[in-house]
């Protein structure tokens, strides 16, 4: 990528190496960078078509840029001149396989915990079969970009065959006389004047896309359009708009030339040699096979969770893993607050500020997103029913285990590696700032950070049990797909 010919210089600030030209900068996904443009006081700077705000400086302008939670090629446009660069995958990012593991673990544990819920609405955890599911919607959103690229390749180079058809055509349109045409002429040529008929029965070979593999593509698109219509009608807010937007794209694909004249497949699907060997059609078919596998998950559909919000899924997964440990130890008694029921079915409700709580033996609890309010203890204590308060600000730890009047706080941090010391420093606000409103004593026994990765070197001490016992805080490794240790 070259700098603009006008002489302006575009720089990106890297935390490791300071200011670098855009050609030298190594951009990583989901990261904030500072940028500056010299020798231009009023530029138009676009990042993937979106304008970047800036403030003037003595030498030009400066601003900040947030790279998307996705790797790949991006375009930075300066005063109408486009320049391509690349955003690299963050090594701290979980793989798609780990993302799927978290979804599966959450939903499987939710189904098992339903037996402890105490709901009496007549639902059967083993017999539910919902066409719509949270995991399926998440899969569609995450995989739609891949599906778009596959369809573009299919549309550019669709599989086709030469098909021979016999029909009557005007004699002036005959381009080649074959044996069958000659025989027909001998039988049907006018005997009196030996004239050639105006229309001749002949066979013609022409290319067609109406073959099994393309019929299967059209069948898949019609089914996906119907599925997205259901999500659009079932959901509301942002999710409704997103489902409608994806549905419109699918409808646009159905009108592409590669599917013109192609009939959708009807009947049992078989895997042909072309589907096995053609890389694009094979990936296309695999995408839809995975789509329908999500129907086996027994969970209601209540909200969406985009890939960029993987940290939210990680928080839920950690919470469900602690519930699983309580269930395995025999202390779990009631999980009814994990669910809500409507006339349409059962929904898992884990969301910010919902304070979803499961009950354990002896009155203990595990709460997701528990809220601790700021209060003045001198005025609130006589009239309040709340046992705890904060004297600084409202606090919402991700996971709180209450044992008697003592609290144990866990804070999942999906992208904390390399910064565990600072993250633990922030945990002091929970340990010191949450108090018993009646006697003003601190109530938080221990605070732990949960992270899918484990640091080496100096920060390894935060994971050591001796550190945990001495300082009542530390880090715990919680990696999807890896057996859990005690925590």
Image (cartoon, grey):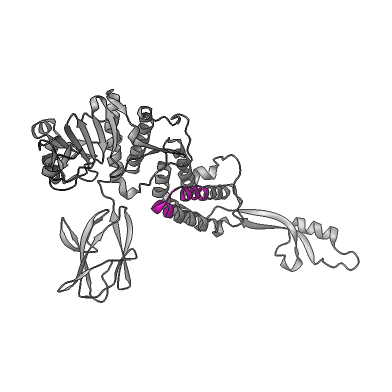
* Image spot of residue 463 (x, y percent): 15, 35
Residue 479, visible in the rendered structure: no
Residue 21 in the image: above or below residue 478: below
Write the start and end of the magenta stretch as one range: 224-242
Horizontal side of residue 431 vs 321, given as left or right? left
Q: Quadrant of residue 14?
A: bottom left
Residue 323 in the image: above or below residue 68: above
In the image, farthest residue toward the right:
192
Q: Residue at x 42, y 45 (%)?
A: 137
* Image spot of residue 80 (x, y percent): 33, 73
Residue 468, visible in the rendered structure: yes
In the image, farthest residue toward the left:
470
Horizontal side of residue 217 vs 469, given as left or right? right
Q: Quadrant of residue 365?
A: top left
Q: Quadrant of the C terminus?
A: top left
* Image spot of residue 262 (x, y percent): 60, 53
Q: Residue at x 35, y 46 (%)?
A: 305
Is 312 part of what is drawn in magenta? no
Horizontal side of residue 328 vs 249, given as left or right? left
Is 236 part of what is drawn in magenta? yes
In the image, farthest residue toward the top:
330
Q: Quadrant of residue 200?
A: bottom right
Q: Residue at x 46, y 52 (%)?
A: 150
* Image spot of residue 347 (x, y percent): 40, 39
In the image, 36 versus 340, the foreground residue is 340
**Number of marks in the rendered image:** 0
Secondary structure character of the magenta stretch overall: helix
Q: Quadrant of the N terminus?
A: bottom left
């Amino acid at each position: 990528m070259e700098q603009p010919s006008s002489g302006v210089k575009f720089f990106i600030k890297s935390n490791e190496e300071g200011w670098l030209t855009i050609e030298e900068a190594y951009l990583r996904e989901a990261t904030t960078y500072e940028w500056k443009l010299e020798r231009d006081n009023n530029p138009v700077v676009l990042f993937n078509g979106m304008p970047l705000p800036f403030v003037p400086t003595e030498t030009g302008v400066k601003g900040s840029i947030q790279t998307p939670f996705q790797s790949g090629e991006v375009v930075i446009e300066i005063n109408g001149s486009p320049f391509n660069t690349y955003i690299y995958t963050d090594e701290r990012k979980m793989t798609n396989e780990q993302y799927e593991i978290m979804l599966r673990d959450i939903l499987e544990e939710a189904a098992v915990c339903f037996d402890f819920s105490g709901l009496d609405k007549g639902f059967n955890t083993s017999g539910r079969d919902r066409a719509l599911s949270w995991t399926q919607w998440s899969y569609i959103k995450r995989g739609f970009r891949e599906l778009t690229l596959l369809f573009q390749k299919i549309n550019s180079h669709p599989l086709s065959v030469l098909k021979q058809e016999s029909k009557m055509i005007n004699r002036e349109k005959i381009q080649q006389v074959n044996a069958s045409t000659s025989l027909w002429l001998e039988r049907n040529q006018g005997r009196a004047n030996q004239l050639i008929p105006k229309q001749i029965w002949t066979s013609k070979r022409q290319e067609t896309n109406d073959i099994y593999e393309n019929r299967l593509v059209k069948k898949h698109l019609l089914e996906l359009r119907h599925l997205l219509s259901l999500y659009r009608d079932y959901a509301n807010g942002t999710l409704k708009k997103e489902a409608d937007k994806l549905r419109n794209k699918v409808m646009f694909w159905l009108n592409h030339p590669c599917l013109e004249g192609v009939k959708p497949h009807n009947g049992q699907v078989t895997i042909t040699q072309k589907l096995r060997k053609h890389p694009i059609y094979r990936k296309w078919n695999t995408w839809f096979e995975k789509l329908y596998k999500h129907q086996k998950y027994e969970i209601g559909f209540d909200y969406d969770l985009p890939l960029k919000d993987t940290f939210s899924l990680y928080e839920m997964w950690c919470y469900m893993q602690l519930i699983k440990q309580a269930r395995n130890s025999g202390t779990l008694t009631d999980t009814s607050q994990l669910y809500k029921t409507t006339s349409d079915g059962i929904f898992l409700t884990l969301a910010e500020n919902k304070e979803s709580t499961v009950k354990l033996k002896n009155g203990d609890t595990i709460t997701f997103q528990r809220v601790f309010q700021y209060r003045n203890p001198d005025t609130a204590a006589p009239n309040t029913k709340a046992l705890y308060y904060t004297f600084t600000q409202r606090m919402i730890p991700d996971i709180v285990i209450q044992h008697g009047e003592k609290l144990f706080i866990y804070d999942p941090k999906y992208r904390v590696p390399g910064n565990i010391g600072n993250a633990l420093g922030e945990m002091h606000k929970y340990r010191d700032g949450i108090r018993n409103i009646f006697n003003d004593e601190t109530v938080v026994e221990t605070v732990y950070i949960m992270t899918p990765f484990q640091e080496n070197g100096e920060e390894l001490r935060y994971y050591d049990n001796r550190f945990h016992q001495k300082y009542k805080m530390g880090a715990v490794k919680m990696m999807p797909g890896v057996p859990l240790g005690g925590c």
